Image: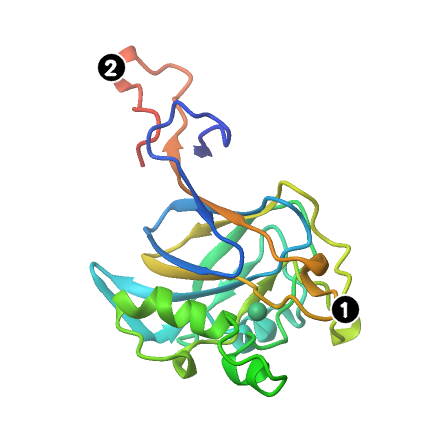
Amino acid sequence: MRVLEAATDDSVPSISRTIVPAGHGYSFAVSAGERFRIVDLHGQQVVDFMAWARTGRRCHLDEKVSMAYTRYHHYGATPSTGDYLWTNRDRELFRITDDTVRVHDMTFMACFPELYEKRGLRGHRACASNIAEAMAPWGMKNHLEVADPFNLFQNTPLYAIKGNLLSSRPGDFIEFEALDDAVVAISCCPYDLDGFNGGKITDVAVMTGFRLSPRKPENASLESDSTPGSA
Ligand SMILES: [Zn+2]
């Protein structure tokens, strides 16, 4: 039997916390068995989530987490704790292991540069280009290569976009377990129009390095103790 190290135990050296500035993107590698959290620090901030399969330093941009495959396996679009995210190779790449919000969107695309340009906002940051920038070290060339996002903390009742999200509060988070090695990219959505994102865009945090560790058997000797934080 395996248990998760205490989520807030700062003594576990492998846990790290990265602040993603408002309106920007970030990518990070995760390994099979690792858990990580996306934290909405200030509330009502949508985070676009995408991920690709990885082997060592090679990211497989052709195998991505797919919202269409995930919706098919869920018979719908409202996943939460215990559910999986599927790739377009029809395999589970992540499991949702905790979710304090339970309101997310699997139906809308990432905001993209042309969307802003058509509103006279040339040069406005966009989720699609944020993620393309963050994925450039992994071989992504431009924002047309991004996937359909899992829009964390985005409230779209009856698949209609709602300006005032009324979903996530400060400190809310969703936690995933990687079932295989992967690269994750997120964008702290820069859409600051129409009251979306609570009317102002804010920073979010990524916490990585939560590890599963073997539970010590009832009759285990001291020698068999596992090192905290080890896999
Ligand atoms: Zn966006």
Q: State the colouring used for the structure image.
A: rainbow
Judge by depth and name the residue closer to the eye, 96 or 143: 143
Q: Are marks 1 and 2 in contact (CB under 8 Å)?
A: no
The image shows residue 81 at horizontal and vertical percentages of 61, 50
Nearest to N terminus: mark 1 or mark 2? 1
Q: For ligand 1, which image quadrant applies?
A: bottom right
Q: Position of residue 74 (x, y in %)?
A: 62, 68
How far from the left and from the top, in percent, is residue 215? Answer: 41, 27
Residue at image position (62%, 76%) is: 108
Name the secondary structure under disc 1: loop
The answer to whether mark 2 is within 8 Å of ligand 1 is: no
Determine the CA span between mark 1 and mark 2.
56 Å
Mark carried by residue 162? 1
Q: Where does the C terminus fall, quadrant-wise?
A: top left
What residue did someone put label 2 on? Answer: 223
Residue at (21, 58) in percent of width and height: 56
Judging from the image, what secondary structure is the residue with disc 2 in?
helix
Foreground disc of the pair 1, 2: 1
Amino acid at dot 1: Lys
Residue 195 picture quarter: bottom right
Looking at this view, is 162 or 9 the one in front?
162
Question: Height in image: 70 above or below 145?
Answer: above
- Asked whether, in this view, residue 144 is left or right of residue 85, the answer is left
Residue 170 lies, with reference to residue 23, above or below; the image says: above
Q: Residues within 10 Å of mark 2 (few under 14, many from 20)?
A: few
- Location of residue 83 with respect to 122 vertically, above or below: above
- For image coordinates 56% across by 75% down, the residue present is 111
Q: Residues within 10 Å of mark 1 (few under 14, many from 20)?
A: some
Residue depicted at x 59% and y 44%: 41
Instruction: Name the residue nearer the viewer: 203 or 63.
Output: 203
Identify which amino acid the numbered label 2 is placed on: Glu
Question: In the picture, which quadrant includes the N terminus?
Answer: top left
